[in-house]
Amino acid sequence: MSQHARLARWLHRQWQHRGWFSTLLSPLSGLAGVIVRRKHARYRREPHAAYRSPVAVIVVGNIIVGGAGKTPVVQALARHLRELGWTPGIISRGYGVKVGAEPRVGQGSLPASQFGDEPALIAAQTQAPIAVHPRRALAAQALLRDFPAVDLIISDDGLQHLALERDLEVVVQDARGVGNGRLLPAGPLREPPERLLRADWLVTQLNADQPAPRTPHPADPARCLTMTLAPCRMEQLATGLNLEWTRWREQYSGRSVQALAAIGQPERFFSMLRLNGLNLSATRSRPDHAALAPQDFTGLHDGPILITRKDAVKCQGMDDPRLWVVDVLPVFSRPHWIQELDGVLRTRRAVPPSPTRS
């Protein structure tokens, strides 16, 4: 494990309780709270300061730092809402890349070095057009300019980006819940825990062996659900060979298997693999959004190395037969929640229902 990854794990452990580290930094968290409250107050006083898109906007975000599971929720929304008659497009900050003054807009297979790893993954998996820029309003305008058929914008992250008005908010959390309940840097939160009460939907990503955290929930308990991720397919990156998960596990059950992840919570990926029957002989963590190069896999043995689809977009061109990409399927405790969301969204935007596409 890299020094950066060890530091990140240490910080997250400290942020789960109110020990000496958290208490020492609590005055800074108080200052952060003042800034957050002033920001919200400004947009309440000046509602026209925010950009109002001509099409519906759903923001998928979180209040806790470190990957909470937004990406599979964004992908699920894009796929299912397309089936329900929408033409979705995606906007994102493009974390980890220097976008420049003008948003970058594209569709399909996009280079992670120009769009960011998560936007490139979402674009490839959903085939929805995507625009990236730190200013979400500019990204939304560029997306609608280049893809005028888009009638629904899904913002990947941006919960705290109040300069973009939204019709619905979907907040994603994980087993950490709200940690020690404190704002950065004394805790892991970007906004106070009470912010969850204003979410339209709250999705909690858990591994199969994890209990749901006790956190503030939206007023309607029917809009709270859990999500687990299960491996469904495997792709050998060098050859493009695809195998269903059960078949791959049968073929490689006797081999020594390793895993590498450069995501917000790499242990969650490793735990998922173990819970689905794999005995990992080695794991390797890299910082979230880190670029990956062949040397990152040096020292691992000749057996399969499992990586996430998010990391795979940064490994294109690596001719390493050890690399296998794990595709996952989100399983929601409320299977029809996106249909319910669709109804609420159409009511708020006064959009008539469209025929369901086959």
Image (cartoon, rainbow, N blue to C red):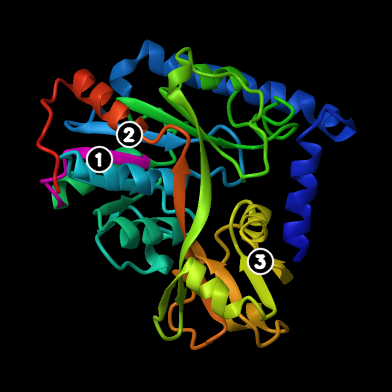
Image quarter of residue 45: top left
Instruction: Looking at the picture, tell me which residue is in the foreground, 123 or 280.
Output: 280
In the rendered structure, does residue 57 fall within the stretch colored magenta? no
Residue 4 drawn at (x, y percent): 73, 59
Q: Which mark is residue 278?
A: 3
Q: Which residue type carries mark 2? A: Ile
Residue 226 vs 125, above or below: the answer is above
Q: Which residues are magenta?
A: 147-155
Under tag 3, what secondary structure? loop
State whether residue 139 appears in this view. Answer: no
Q: Is residue 157 visible?
A: yes
Q: Which residue is mark 2?
A: 338
Disc 2 and disc 1 in contact, CB within 8 angstroms = yes
- Can you tell which of label 2 and label 3 is closer to the viewer? 3
Gap in angstroms between the C-alphas marked 2 and 3: 32 Å
Compare marks 3 and 1 and give the one earlier in the sequence: 1
Mark seen at residue 81: 1
Image x and y of residue 110, in percent: 32, 67
Left or right, residue 243 beside residue 137: right
Three-letter amino acid code at the position of disc 3: Leu
Image vertical order of residue 169 relative to residue 94, above or below: above
